[in-house]
Amino acid sequence: MNRKYITIDGIPAPIEGEKNVLDIIRKVGIDMPTFCYYSDLSVYGACRMCVVEDKHGDVFTSCSTPPRSGMELRTNTPRLQQYRKMILELMLADHCRDCTTCEKNNKCKLQEFASRFGLREVRFENLRSGDVRDHSSRSIVRDKNKCILCGDCVRMCSEIQNVGAIDFSYRGSKMEVIPAFDMPIAETNCVNCGQCSAVCPTGAIVVKDDTRQVWKDLNDEHVVMIAQIAPAVRVALGDEFGLPPGSNVMGKIVTALKRMGFDEVYDTATGADLTVVEEAKEFLSRFETGEKLPLFTSCCPAWFKYAENNHPDMLDNLSSCKSPMQMFGSVLKENIRQSGQKKKGTKVKVVAIMPCTAKKYEAAREEFRFGEDQTIDYCITTQELASMIRESGIRFSTILPEAVDMPFGIASGAGIIFGVTGGVTEAVMRYALREESKQYIKAIAFTGVRGFEGVKEAIIPYKEKEIKIAIVSGLANAEKLIQAIRSGDCQYDFVEVMACPGGCICGAGQPFAEHWAKEERADGMYEADRMSNVKISSENPTTDGLYGGLLKGIKAHELLHYK
Amino acid sequence: MSKALSYEKLNEIIANYPVEKPPIVSILQDIQEEYRYLPQEVFPYLSEKLKVSLAKIYGVATFYENFSLTPKGEYIIKICDGTACHVRKSIPILEALRKELGLNQEKHTTDDLGFTVETVSCLGACGLAPVITVNDKVYASMTPEKTVELLNELRKERNHDHQ
């Protein structure tokens, strides 16, 4: 067979369906630098770092060039080296270079490439000065002085999330990535998903850092600090400490938090078990009567905000359940209030460790207050936790794991898989089918709820009927689905929406990961589920105990629902 | 005076264009034609109607020099500063106009919204250099003196219209 191939630096490389030359170059083991190329986003070709030279001496960007059989390309000629250096130099001339105090220090692509390509001086005058940061958002901080105009955030926000809170404005040397009228980002339709910060190669958009306050309270003897750890955190934090992607480091996190000074540490998956029970009850009652269907999940705060912005008429279709973080926070605080454990003069604060930037915003929402305080006092991301661990000096890779605390120390596997797209659905369906055989419940995993596709469908037989399910991640996918539902093209009973493509394991608060590493995280979640001895949320003795005690009567609705 | 914003008028403009992939530039041009600038209130309305993000429309509006987000004067005077006009002394014309109207590099429009003075890079009428236009009417071979004369006539015309 006559195979099609191109030649890269003298080495033949087959064309195997790649859409552009860049993918082939990377396939043959060359780490081609890029700022503006992400396979999930449209090709932009702006940063010019991935330039190649062909045998005629033509120079072009490999990301935006489709492969043609017979191409002979060089990736590292003196001319290309010179071009790349020049591009970097020009970028640095237009960049705030306070690297040592930058949030992205050591994680910045511009810094990495400047080092990799041996840049030792910038010949041009630096045009950036002053502090122009936008601190208005609870979730992200924007710094125009660090923007290299790669447009990754713009395309992420509009193409994947269908939000479009920021875009290019002005022209030429005055071009900026800003919201309309340069208004503060918090006043726009931004949903706080933070995916812009996840793809930003520099410190132009970073996650808001709330670790200072947490440290302050950890060192205050009058504050009792309780931590809850979201499911997705345990399979991603290890990335920051050189552990294999997807490793479950839950036990180590508990140890690290205890050493840092947390008084009690719990698993948000326990809260998720409450969510499953509440949401499943809500769903089944709607399903019986056929009212307000489909039921949309509501645990993703970015999705919730998106629905408020774009589909206010559909809010009744969103579950009235609080998110697992909020449910668990309410239970923790109510427990202390009722039991009178609290010593006089002390204050109890709940810190949630989340894979998510939107949770910071959710924590501050009015409906989630507990008395005068926020139910969740602080919300920090996986990456912030990593930085706290580093700051504390704890050697994460060598510490021994510990178990979470009682009395809320048990979580079901159903609660844990909340961290991956399709997990909420699987957990709710396990509850719905809890009276069926064990094999039947295991079979839910094979109905199409698992996997990384942006839109998944499943049909689950329930009593005499069928439950029609859709699972979407990425808000642009959610929008398409909603339009199909509105037009009557599709009909569903239950719709799970997660704003971040792939679910919480791919949240913007997580360490940055390539696609394969995200799949490892999903596997890590399902492994934790397999290893847990409780598979169905209602069989969790902790939740069972809560419903028999703390949540008895009307308390359950009051504490676990936002309306 | 500038016209009050009418959503009916906006709907009328939008209705002239296809719903799928609406041409933002053409729509903004029509709106600017109507109001002599792009009032801020137009943007959220357009965003909702066209299903295009606010930031995107703002991006288009700020990309093109021709769009203005601040109200422009009744008479828009454009001084050509292309190469031909420049070498035939367009800058003294610009300076004379600015001095006469109390304008400068940052301030392009008089407080009474009577006159806007801006430069353009070439009007494509180099044989007539230096050229200025007043509300798109071309005046050829201008000098600072002739321009001030013209301005005084325009002022008279304006006063007459407002009486």
Image: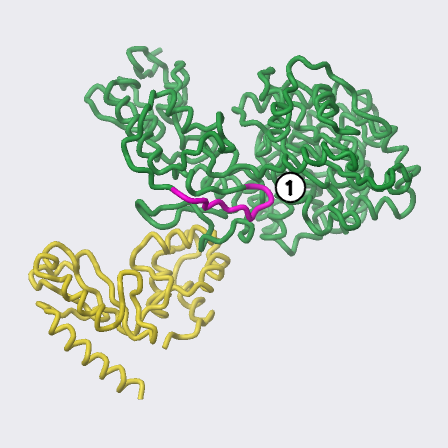
Horizontal side of A419 relative to A150 (left or right) equals right
A307 within the magenta span:
no
Callout 1: chain: A
Q: Amino acid at mark 1?
A: Lys
Q: Within the image, what quadrant is residue A538 found in?
A: top right
Image coords of residue B19 (percent x, y)? 44, 56
User: At 86% from the left edge and 30% from the top edge, which residue is drawn?
Assistant: A542
- Residue lying furthest bottom: B163
Residue count near mark 1 (Cα–Cα under 10 Å), binned few <14, some 14–19, many ≥20: many
Image coords of residue A510 (percent x, y)? 59, 29
Q: Is residue A1 visible?
A: yes
A139 within the magenta span:
yes
Name the tint of chain B in the rendering. Answer: yellow
User: At 12% from the left edge and 57% from the top edge, which residue is drawn?
Assistant: B86
Name the tint of chain A in the rendering. Answer: green
Image coords of residue A370 (percent x, y)? 78, 47
The image shows residue A152, relative to residue B108, as above or below, that is above
Horizontal side of A159 relative to A235 (left or right) equals left
Report the magenta stretch's main SS.
loop
- Quadrant including the N terminus of chain A: top left
User: Label 1: which residue?
Assistant: A360
Horizontal side of A194 relative to A127 (left or right) equals right
- Highlighted range, magenta: A129-140
The residue closer to the viewer here, A480 or B118, is B118
Image coords of residue A76 (percent x, y)? 29, 18
User: At 25% from the left edge and 26% from the top edge, which residue is drawn?
Assistant: A59
The image shows residue A374, relative to residue A238, as above or below, that is below
**Regarding mark 1 in the picture, which secondary structure is present there?**
helix
The image shows residue B131, relative to residue A361, as above or below, that is below
